[in-house]
Image (cartoon, grey):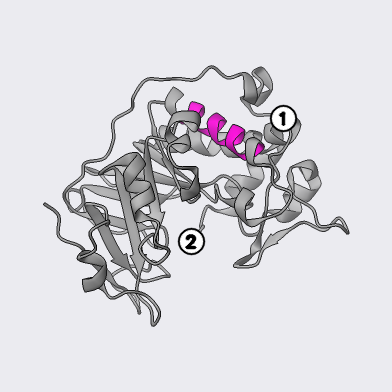
Amino acid sequence: MRTVPAVALAAGLVMASCVGCVSPDDVARDRTSPPLPPTSGAFDYQLGTAYGEPGELDVVVRDGAADPLEGAYNVCYVNGFQTQPGTLPDWERHRPEALLREDDGAPVVDPDWPDEAVLDPSTPGQREEIVAVVAPLIDGCAAAGFDAVEIDNLDTFLRFDGVDRDGALALARVYADRAHAHGLAIAQKNAAELGAAGRDDVGFDLAVVEECAAFEECAAYRAVYGPHVLQVEYVGDDDPSPTELCTGEERAPLTIVRDRLLVGPHEEGYVREQCPTA
């Protein structure tokens, strides 16, 4: 789910941003360790609808446009490797070099999310264009009071020909540096194949994973981040049952089963079941 309002991203497309002050590839790595989320307590994944009262949750992931929940460890969702719905015309107008292109010049779109185009971080210039838009969103997460950021779609270099792996990881390092400069932790999302490189070479501090049980990737994330994996699974005809998920040996301590639209508790289709924690 990706719900950052188009207006917030569109503003970044035309802003000069602070990226011009320092090249994204020359930013010094910040090796300080930001606080990580607890590994027990109540957890929720709320990208669709933000809900709940202060004190009800210990860890929550919310969209960057939502407010943090008082009393919880708050993770801020940012889509760092694809455009947000409704913003493609602005990218084309203001930062066309940042888009991955088909042979005919058309932007490459994600077939699973056809209103999102794929960003191309292959060159330093392209990365600077992308960072000019996305870095202010990370800044906004910090200003709002979030504790960490989740950067979505890291795995575009695995899913789309033409996205350079080294360029994607260089962009991820810039995001990690930006987050750490604010004292925020940063979560790896996707690309389990990176193994320890996500932590050691990029600077990710934890992982937020969707359907790692369904894709048999939970062990890969746990091997790198230990208990600091926030695991989200979904209910559906082809998905493992909550009982199967919660009894899996490789599941994370904080594992939740949610409806795919991530709606609120008073909306049709709402599902939230958390696996027992120690």
Amino acid marked by disc 1: Pro
User: Does the image show residue 15?
Assistant: no
Badge 1: residue crowd in 10 Å (few <14, some 14–19, many ≥20): some
Observer-nearest of 33 and 55: 33
As displayed, is residue 53 above or below residue 142?
below
Observer-nearest of 250 and 135: 250
Q: Residue at x 32, y 50 (%)?
A: 230
Q: Is residue 85 toward the left or the right of residue 266 in the image?
A: right
Count the numbered circles shown.
2
Badge 2: residue crowd in 10 Å (few <14, some 14–19, many ≥20): some
Q: Which mark is residue 1?
A: 2
Point out the stretch of residues depicted in magenta. Answer: 167-179
Q: Which mark is residue 271?
A: none
Q: Residue at x 33, y 40 (%)?
A: 225
Q: Is residue 156 toward the left or the right of residue 189 in the image?
A: right
Q: Which mark is residue 124?
A: 1
x, y percentage for residue 43?
24, 54
x, y percentage for residue 156?
61, 51
Q: Residue at x 71, y 44 (%)?
A: 120
Amino acid marked by disc 2: Met
As displayed, is residue 114 above or below residue 97?
below
x, y percentage for residue 49?
38, 62
Measure how far apart labels 2 and 1 are at the Cα level: 28 Å
